[in-house]
Image (cartoon, rainbow, N blue to C red):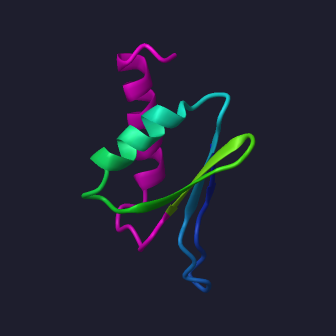
């Protein structure tokens, strides 16, 4: 997992990069539905990565860790791991 955090000067929105070898795309999509009250995300799939970019700033500075934990829990509960 690699997180690009914004600097105070840039005001850039964070982006979460997930390795497709470790994260299941179905679980990622399902988690984004459940996280709608936190924020909406742009989902991009590349050859080896899943990229998640918030469409607007998210107040919780730990959103990326919380989302990753949620995805992993979904994968475990759905026996995807």
Q: Is residue 20 above or below residue 67?
A: above
- Residue at 38 percent across and 36 percent down: it is 70
Between 18 and 10, the one nearer to me in the picture: 18
Q: Position of residue 59 (x, y in %)?
A: 35, 68
Residue 60 appears at what percent x and percent y?
36, 61
Whether the magenta-drawn stretch holds residue 16 is answered as no
> Which segment is the magenta one?
54-81
Identify the residue at the far right of this view. Answer: 47
Query: Is 26 situated left or right of 1 in this image?
Result: left
Q: Nearer the viewer, residue 25 or 7?
A: 25
Residue shown at 75% from the left, 43% from the top: 47
* Residue furthest out toward the top: 79
Q: Quadrant of residue 48?
A: top right
Is 37 left, or right, of 39 in this rendering? left
Q: Is residue 69 magenta?
A: yes
Q: Position of residue 23 (x, y in %)?
A: 57, 32
Q: Residue at x 37, y 62 (%)?
A: 40
Say which quadrant the N terminus sits in: top right
Q: Quadrant of residue 74?
A: top left
Quarter location, residue 52:
bottom right
């Amino acid at each position: 997992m690699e997180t690009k955090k914004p600097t105070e000067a840039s005001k850039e929105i964070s982006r979460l990069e997930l390795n497709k070898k470790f994260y299941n795309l179905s679980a990622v999509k399902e988690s984004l539905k459940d996280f709608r009250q936190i924020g909406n995300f742009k989902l991009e799939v590349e050859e080896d990565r899943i990229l998640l970019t918030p469409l607007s700033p998210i107040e919780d500075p730990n959103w990326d860790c919380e989302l990753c934990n949620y995805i992993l829990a979904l994968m475990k509960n759905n026996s995807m791991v």
